[in-house]
Image (tube, rainbow, N blue to C red):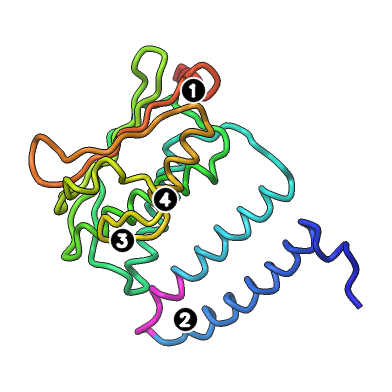
Amino acid sequence: MKTRDDLTLSGLVHDLNNVFQTLVDAADLLSSDPRYAKLSVAILRSVERGKNIATSLQSGTGTATPFEQILANAIAFVEDSVAAGRGAEISFSCNVETGIQLGGHWAWERVLINLFRNSMHAMPAGGTIHVLARLTGHEIEIVVRDDGSGIAPEVLNDIFLPHVSTGSGGLGLHIVETIVKQEGGCVRAANRSDGPGAEFVITLPSNHRALPARAS
């Protein structure tokens, strides 16, 4: 008979690790077939990501993480989704100022992944996602742009409400706004003025989220 201890975070992490092991076993089987080699690698990377998230939640760590690392992990998620057959080929163009570090890096990966997934739905034939991150005075500015169809005018003002569709539907952009607000920032959406596509601009206070770049 299960006890109340089974409902603790440690118990849930234990159960998740059992699920992860099943996925690892499945990936190992797929790796023996050249047709599924990329899919096997994608599954293993996703399992590793899941294990790291579970460990982070269990330990309660919230150390600052370089934005470059957060971005690389989010891009790897997109690449794994493409490898699993969940979208056309996507490339990235990144311009990231060094020295930006964010706490709660799993939440920020979630922000970027949801923005990237939104862009992928707007570019069903593939395209480029552009990412800019920089310090502007006392703020951090993060910009995500795509080359897609843009945001319909009738939904632009309500884009962050739950279940308002930009082509992908769901809660992705609502989750983005929720996390950004929890971190004391704001996010706005617009259609690009320099060509087709949408852009999302996040601004955050830099006083406790950004650290100066180390001298080389």
Pair 3/1: label in front: 3
Residue 74's tag is 4
The residue under the point 64% across, 36% down is 62
The residue under the point 42% across, 47% down is 174
Check disc 2 and give the amino acid type.
Ser
Q: Look at the numbered discs 4 and 2 and tell me whether their residues touch, using CB distance below 8 Å.
A: no
Check disc 4 and give the amino acid type.
Ala
Q: Secondary structure at mark 4?
A: helix
Q: Secondary structure at mark 2?
A: helix
Which quadrant would the N terminus be assigned to in this image? bottom right
Looking at the image, which is closer to me, 90 or 168?
168
Pair 2/3: label in front: 3
Q: Look at the numbered discs 4 and 3 and tell me whether their residues touch, using CB distance below 8 Å.
A: no
Question: Is residue 113 a member of the stretch shown in magenta?
Answer: no
Check disc 1 and give the amino acid type.
Ala
Residue 15 at x, y = what percent?
73, 69
- The residue under label 3 is 168
**Magenta highlight range:** 34-41
Measure how far apart labels 1 and 2 are at the Cα level. 41 Å
Q: Main secondary structure of the magenta part?
A: helix
